[in-house]
Image (cartoon, coloured by chain):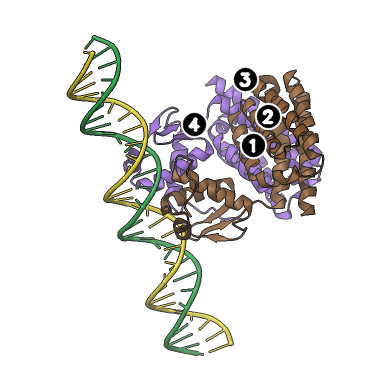
Chain colours: A brown, B purple, C green, D yellow
Amino acid sequence: MIIDNFAKSLEQSVFLKLEEEILNGELKKGESLTENSLSSRLGVSRTPIRAALHHLAEEGLVKIEANRGVTVVGVSETDLVDIYTIRMRLEGLASRAAASNISEEDLSDLRDSVELSEFYIRKRDAEHLKELDTRFHEIIYRASSNPRLDKILSELHRNIRVYRKLSLTVSDRLEKSVEEHREILSAIESGNAEEADRLMTSHISSALDSVLSAVEKQ
Amino acid sequence: MIIDNFAKSLEQSVFLKLEEEILNGELKKGESLTENSLSSRLGVSRTPIRAALHHLAEEGLVKIEANRGVTVVGVSETDLVDIYTIRMRLEGLASRAAASNISEEDLSDLRDSVELSEFYIRKRDAEHLKELDTRFHEIIYRASSNPRLDKILSELHRNIRVYRKLSLTVSDRLEKSVEEHREILSAIESGNAEEADRLMTSHISSALDSVLSAVEKQ
DNA sequence: GATTTTTAAATTGTATACAAGAATACAAGT
DNA sequence: ACTTGTATTCTTGTATACAATTTAAAAATC
């Protein structure tokens, strides 16, 4: 099969495709990948495959051993706790910074995302809600005005994508989550950095609880 | 103890060389790099150059625009504050985790690093002290038992290498720093996670103050 | 002279060929 | 049966050739 081609470079497409396959579990943990087989399977040469694999290695999704090859690492439940522990601190920091720095435009986007979420809650439209959840957090990353923080959090956020979907299936979690977003938004709107920090930290903590209970039920 | 496996591939060497040149300021911010010129200057083909550039882009030291090339980004003073702000939270977290999880081996390494530092303070050997400072922090990163935290902090730590050297030239900072390391070690030894967190956070905060005053004096 | 169009050069993106290292299979010796 | 040495094969690492895109420069039009 040829890969989806909406990204500008083959490397990008290969990266996205492999990332997707790893996060979906199509490529299982421990599985070893060879550049040749990927090359023939995806219908592109080894060059973009190599670049994509290196990119994945940077994100920690695969492990490259010199002259020995690539094995899938994936995201384990331990990683999940590790990531949420980091997020708890860093998203708190991002919210705090956003409360002080946010631009009118970002603030407006943030309001829109919360209001839309409240709309879709009434519609019981889980698909849109998941998307809006991601958008809410990403706006805050950007609004922190700290590009490195943005980059780190975006990456962590992507790596737990699959698990987040799971967590939002826990009953009442969607509603709770939107309520918490609303409170965080209020704190940011009123420039209350301390409160924004505290609320976001507790929001991530609740999300972790929810994810873990969802994982256990599987 | 893990052996320092020196650059076995050309890509690695190129990466290290370019990283060094960027952090040293030999390659200035805003400068644009072409694969060909780097290839002929460093005497290797474009393939490892490309890989190294992508790696540098992942770390944020250069910026790659599709089909347009690579420009040096480097680490600005704004980045410096951004990085220390992140470190304040994450190294606190790492110390906290270390206080609960540290292995006998890591603890022993940590003690060694502090004792050696105290030795070199008496000898007034700044070079060894800088090296030991790095080692102290890296042991804690590892001892957090959170590989992602380890990776994020290691990368941030590397990116401010040049500035850190500067900060340790501020009078009394070396002594102060070693004293603070000793206190952090005590907290970790006694498993006092709360205290380890608090002390490390304040340690990084002092380091930032010191870096900023050193930068201003330049 | 200014502006658009065309053309050429430079540069990145991709494919492929070749070299080097590692894993595997197998034979010989004990 | 087990180890050891060797040859073969497989896989990654690197170099180079080619394609596609972008920048610039020159030519043409107004």
Q: How many angstroms separate mark 2 from mark 1 (CA)?
A: 9 Å
In this rendered view, identify the residue nearer to me: B128 or D22. D22
Q: Are marks 2 and 4 on the same chain?
A: no
Disc sitting over residue B74 in the figure: 4
Q: Earlier in the sequence, mark 3 or mark 2?
A: 2
Q: Chain of mark 2?
A: A
Which residue does the numbered mark 1 point to in the structure image? A153
Q: Are marks 2 and 1 on the same chain?
A: yes
Q: Is residue B181 left or right of residue B164?
A: right
Q: Secondary structure at mark 4?
A: loop
Q: Chain of mark 4?
A: B
Residue A163, horizontal then vertical, whole percent: 70, 47
Query: Which residue type carries mark 1?
Result: Leu
Residue A194, horizontal then vertical, whole percent: 77, 24
Q: Secondary structure at mark 1?
A: helix
Query: Which residue type carries mark 3?
Result: Glu
What crowding class fits label 3: few (fewer than 14 Cα within 10 Å), some (14-19), or many (20 or more)? few
Q: Secondary structure at mark 2?
A: helix
Q: Are marks 4 and 3 in contact (CB under 8 Å)?
A: no
Residue B161, horizontal then vertical, whole percent: 55, 36
Which residue does the numbered mark 3 point to in the structure image? A105
Residue C16, horizontal then vertical, whole percent: 33, 56
Q: How many angstroms separate mark 4 from mark 3 (CA)?
A: 28 Å
The structure residue drawn at horizontal position 49% and vertical position 34%, both measured from the top left corner, is B23
In the rendered image of this protein, does residue A185 appear above or below residue B153? above
Q: Are marks 2 and 1 in contact (CB under 8 Å)?
A: yes
Q: Is residue B54 left or right of residue B178?
A: left
